[in-house]
Image (tube, rainbow, N blue to C red):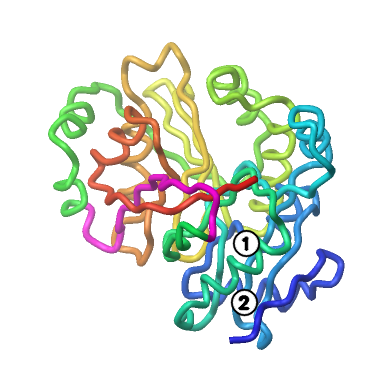
């Protein structure tokens, strides 16, 4: 099998690239050229098969990261590979079934060109490389819920505790969806969760730019729940692509926390889209409490590998 070729960002035909990503059997929105341009500030390269039907985006760390490694490690200059924020999975994508050992061929070429990898996450349809290829690796957790069923059936798969929480709440929750971009979402998320998530102002600006582009392309929407007084209690952003509704993040107002509006938000999202050929992608988590919250909606665990070396 011929080795894939490494391309710089400037060499890429983004129209062809996005066509492959859009048609890929294991496609995810994180691999679109416009998505990568925003989350990496156009600092990415690509490995592409000789026939152009398989591709692997390679996100590069910011220059300030590489400078810090020189100071910290006392080593020579290296271009580091670094998984960007708001980009859970990358790896190899193809609009055809992957050939035998194709993943290994691509990863060998990745390691040959980039000996320093801070972290690089494969997609859930890829197997981990042989141990001798990667310095270190570990599995991370995602949760997916099949929505192509009747709502009653899906709700029957909720845990008893989730069903009790929804029944116990005496609020007449109003569930809403909106494709209009909202700056206040990021301001509120930063106010209530900024310290907990570790996102700084630069990260929030980049996230806002990403979401603004996504909503402009009609590939995402905001979801909200309000109480009977029409007061906002919880809000989240959903990325919609490749037959998935991907939860990218949300928050609950502190004064509404006891009434568990996030239960109502996800239940409203599920009820609205039940019976459609969609997966609800919770985008994580490895945090036990968060993972358990997602699992109790009946979501199934899916693992994906992350690797690093150097």
Residue 13 lies in magenta, yes or no? Answer: no
* Closer to us: 99 or 274: 99
Locate the N terminus by quadrant: bottom right
Vertical position of residue 134 compared to residue 63: above or below: below
* Label 2–label 1 contact, CB within 8 A: no
Residue at the spot 72% in from the left edge and 66% down from the top edge: 46
Magenta residues (range): 133-151
- Residue 283, x across and y down, in percent: 45, 45
The quarter holding residue 200 reads top right
Which residue lies at the image location 60% right of the left edge and 17% below the top edge? 191
Secondary structure at numbered mark 2: helix
- Residue in front for this viewpoint, 270 or 201: 201
Residue 31: mark? 1
Residue 152 coordinates in the image, percent (x, y): 17, 51
Q: From this viewpoint, which residue is outermost toward the top?
A: 255
Residue marked by disc 2: 20
Q: Secondary structure at mark 1?
A: helix
Closer-to-camera residue (165/66) = 66
Image vertical order of residue 148 relative to residue 301, above or below: below
Residue at the location (63% across, 72% down)? 55
């Amino acid at each position: 099998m011929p080795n894939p070729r490494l391309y710089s960002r400037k060499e890429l035909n983004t129209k062809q690239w996005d066509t492959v990503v859009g048609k890929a059997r294991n496609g995810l929105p994180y691999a679109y050229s416009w998505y990568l341009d925003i989350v990496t500030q156009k600092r990415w390269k690509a490995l592409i098969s000789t026939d152009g039907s398989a591709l692997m985006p390679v996100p590069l760390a910011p220059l300030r990261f590489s400078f810090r490694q020189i100071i910290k490690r006392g080593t020579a200059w290296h271009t580091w590979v670094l998984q960007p924020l708001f980009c859970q999975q990358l790896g190899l994508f193809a609009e055809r079934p992957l050939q035998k050992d194709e993943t290994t061929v691509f990863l060998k070429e990745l390691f040959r060109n980039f000996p320093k990898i801070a972290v690089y996450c494969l997609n859930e349809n890829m197997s981990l490389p042989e141990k001798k290829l990667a310095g270190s690796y570990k599995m991370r957790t995602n949760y997916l819920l099949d929505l192509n069923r009747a709502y009653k059936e899906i709700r029957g798969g909720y845990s008893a505790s989730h069903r009790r929480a929804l029944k116990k709440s005496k609020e007449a929750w109003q569930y809403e969806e909106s494709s209009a971009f909202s700056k206040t979402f990021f301001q509120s998320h930063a106010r209530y969760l900024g310290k907990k998530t570790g996102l700084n102002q630069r990260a929030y600006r980049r996230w806002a730019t990403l979401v603004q582009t996504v909503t402009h392309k009609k590939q995402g929407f905001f979801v909200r729940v309000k109480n009977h007084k029409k007061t906002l209690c919880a809000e989240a952003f959903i990325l919609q692509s490749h037959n998935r509704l991907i939860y990218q993040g949300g928050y609950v107002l502190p004064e509404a926390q006891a009434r568990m509006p996030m239960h109502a938000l996800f239940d409203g999202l599920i009820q609205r889209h039940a019976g459609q050929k969609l997966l609800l992608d919770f985008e994580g988590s490895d945090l036990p409490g968060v993972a358990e919250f997602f699992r109790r909606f009946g979501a199934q665990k899916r693992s994906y590998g992350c690797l690093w070396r150097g």
